[in-house]
Image: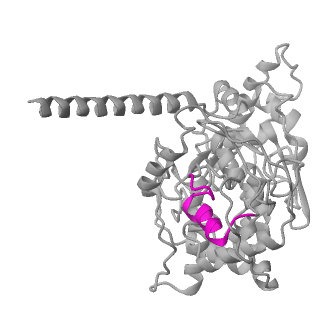
Amino acid sequence: MGWIQAVKRCVGGLMVLGLAWGGAGVVGAAPADPELIQRGEYLARVGDCVACHTAPGGPVFAGGLELPTPVGNIVATNITPSKTAGIGNYTLEQFDAAVRRGIRADGKPLYPAMPYPSYAKVTDEDIEAMYAYFMNAVEPVETRPPQTKLPFPFNIRYSMKLWNALFLDETPFQPDPSQGEEWNRGAYLVQGLTHCSTCHSPRNFLMAEDSSRDLAGGEVGPWHAPNITSDPVSGVGSWSLEEIVAYMKQGSIPKSQAAGPMAEAIDHSFQYMTDADLRAMAVYLKSVPPIAEDGVKKPVDSWGRAHADFASVRGKPWPENPDELNGPQLFDAYCAACHQASGQGTFDRQMPALYQNTATGRLQTNNLVMVILEGIHRVSQGYEVRMPGFAHELSDQQIATLSNYLMQAYGNPDGQTSAEQVANLRQGGPVSSSNLILLARAGMVVGLLVVLALVVWLVRRRRS
């Protein structure tokens, strides 16, 4: 799993609520009003806290999940109200500082592997409700996960103060008086608790979001979080409000199906949100400034048609070398049984059509490859979606051949996949940790040399 997939598992960057256990204070009486606690539970779902702070098969919110990042694994912490292993000693003020400013109870900064730059938009009232929920309704778990250990210089937490000074805007959400209540609610959710930009915005070399291309698409480890601006060709501008709501609620509409980190966000968070909140988010997304992607000629859900290439399959022997199988042969062997011979899917839409589908309509083919590798298995709104993954059955070359055939036959023929790309994605996506570490260390050396030069200059000036 790649680094910003770690990010999307928190719906998740970089998403770890590193509420460490150091620095306990005197806890004020947590509000016990049932309505406040219930609202806090809803907000915790909206924020998808469970995704990062629950290890597979482990107790809810007890932490322990290792999230890969370009500078090493960050271990999600225990955020249950345990007084020895979790956040049970946090005051409301300390909880607020951790969630909205990235400062844990002992005063040390959190890593921006937790979306506090987005949570900074959350209101005081919502922070209070979340605090009431965690302190009163979450079962304490007396398990302390291992501490995060990053390589030098990233193990120096105070370096994050400079990062925060550069990139953290602590201004809470300010309603736009020129917009209606629904739009403002959607803007508050998208910019804040649902932290959509964490995945759907590109990042600079310091791993901060590029605000000039907000929501224009980003990388989540091996997955691609697509453009969700209002651009009608590259983004969701041509989607109806109803389509956006249905996609967030169910994870599947005829022209697009959720997989990977987005599927996790729907399973853990979006499907539990009210229709009113989902519609508000859709209203806002339809209004954000459109950002077009280079090379995108028409809407990604408008490519392709039903197609069957029987002549390349029937009556022809398979090659002795499996890597020499052609696209139609691989499709016939691994895809046609479910997606039908012409790629039209099933009448009940449980198996979607492969044409006029965002999965095959993008120039970026990472998601198509990842679905072939990992498959899809999720349960949402009372129905189950299951597609097997073929990582253990198909080689890198076979998956590249199959992907290219799917794009040529049913999607955007300009989207290409190589065996090297598949191998890279199979290992979790681009590996840039060494470059970041070297860059950080080189920067520290340069800074030290500058300081030494300044000291020498001052000493010589004083002597003269």
Left or right: 139 in relation to 168: right
Q: Can residue 295 be seen here?
A: no
Q: Can residue 62 be seen here?
A: yes
Q: Nearer the viewer, residue 149 or 260?
A: 149
Give residue 128's quadrant in the image.
bottom right
- For image coordinates 84% across by 40% down, the residue present is 335
Percent position of residue 323, x then y: 78, 19
Left or right: 389 in relation to 220: right
Q: Nearer the viewer, residue 71 or 192?
A: 71
Q: Is residue 447 magenta?
A: no
Which quarter of the rendering shows the C terminus?
Answer: top left
Percent position of residue 290, x then y: 47, 63
The magenta stretch is: 89-108
Percent position of residue 429, x then y: 65, 34
Residue furthest top as drawn: 320
Judging from the image, the colouring scheme is: one colour
Q: Is residue 330 above or below residue 340?
A: above
Residue furthest left as drawn: 464
Residue furthest front as drawn: 463
- For image coordinates 71% across by 72% down, the residue present is 130
Give residue 414's quadrant in the image.
top right
Query: How many marks overall?
Result: 0
Q: Nearer the viewer, residue 43 or 423?
A: 43
- For image coordinates 80% across by 51% down, the residue present is 344
Which quarter of the rendering shows the N terminus?
Answer: top right
